[in-house]
Amino acid sequence: MFSAAAAVSWIRLGGMSKQQAADQETEATGQEAAEPDHAASGGGKGAGHGRKHARGSQKGSASAGQESTSARAARAKASPPPAAESDTAAGGAGVRRVAVRPDYVAGAEQAVQLAANLKEREAKLQERDALFATREAHLQLVYDDLRAERAAIDELRKQLENEVKVLEEKVTHFEQQRSDLDNRQQAAEQARTRLETEEEANVKMMAGWLNSMDEESVAKIIGQMANTGMMSTAIKVLGKMTERKAAKALPLLPDGLAAQLMEKVEKLKLPPKKGSTSAE
């Protein structure tokens, strides 16, 4: 059986579990308490036997400690032993366990720092993604507004194009009408000029005929023309006749008609000289 010192050594080496250590401590404590009684009853033999038993226990503990050195090293690499704590199991002596620090892992601090940096970077990336999402939403709203405005402008442009097209058609129609009117006016002017030319030729020809007739025949023809609605023609014919022949024919007409014809003829000709009217 292990003594208290052997149990403590075994716990330090990490070879026992908590429950095994508590059992060993309880048993060792009971044996140590019984040794004085046994020594008192047995005398020197008991004391010698106790010393022999103690040496055997120490020897067994030493060999057990040597055997567990390699196992302890393997367990220390696999998993670190628990921290030091006080075990107060029933009947125990309150042995304090010694904490064994785990082996230093190379690069642990760098790994922790790297993890922290990665976490910080991830947070920044998430913040940037949120900012990009906000900007994208804002740009999408602006794009939608611009597209709506462009659609409205296109619709207005189509309406204006239709109105301009209608106005152009009206302008074309008006220009066509004006062109037709100009053509008609030009044709009328040409016809009037042609009629005036023909009338002028006819008046000259008739005046020549009347100049070759006697005064009575001239007065008779002029009177018929004036009474049948050809007053203007009669006046023009008298204006183209020689003054001598006209002066001889007018007195043969009625007084009122003769005076009217003479007044119209004078307006066709140049203004007479002063005193000419009084002379006549």
Image (tube, helix red, strand yellow):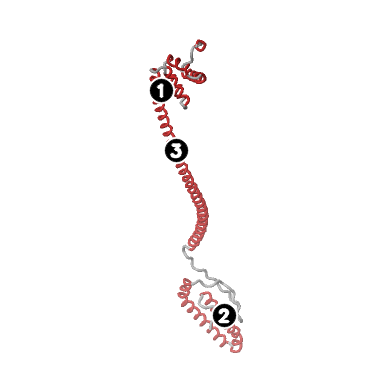
In this picture, is 203 found above or below 140?
A: above
The count of marks equals 3
Distance from disc 1 to disc 3, alpha carbons, whole Å, reads: 38 Å
Residue neighbourhood size for the residue with mark 1, other residues' Cα within 10 Å, grouped as few (<14), some (14–19), many (≥20): many
| Residue 139 picture location, percent across and down | 50, 52
In this picture, is 58 found above or below 181?
A: below
- Looking at the rendered structure, the kind of residue marked 3 is Gln
In this picture, is 168 found above or below 276?
A: below
Distance from disc 2 to disc 3, alpha carbons, whole Å, reads: 128 Å
Q: Secondary structure at mark 1?
A: helix
Which residue in the protein does label 1 denote?
203
In this picture, is 229 found above or below 47?
A: above
Of label 1 and label 2, which has the lower sequence position? 2
- Looking at the rendered structure, the kind of residue marked 2 is Ala
Of labels 1 and 2, the one closer to you = 1
Residue neighbourhood size for the residue with mark 3, other residues' Cα within 10 Å, grouped as few (<14), some (14–19), many (≥20): few
| Residue 255 picture location, percent across and down | 51, 18
Which residue in the protein does label 2 denote?
22
Of labels 2 and 3, the one closer to you = 3
137 or 255: which is nearer to us? 255
Q: Secondary structure at mark 3?
A: helix
From the viewer's perspective, tell me whether residue 28 is left or right of residue 159: right
Distance from disc 1 to disc 2, alpha carbons, whole Å, reads: 165 Å
Of label 2 and label 3, which has the lower sequence position? 2
50 or 214: which is nearer to us? 214
- Looking at the rendered structure, the kind of residue marked 1 is Val
From the viewer's perspective, tell me whether residue 218 is left or right of residue 275: left
| Residue 248 picture location, percent across and down | 45, 15
Which residue in the protein does label 3 denote?
177
Of label 1 and label 3, which has the lower sequence position? 3
Q: Secondary structure at mark 2?
A: helix
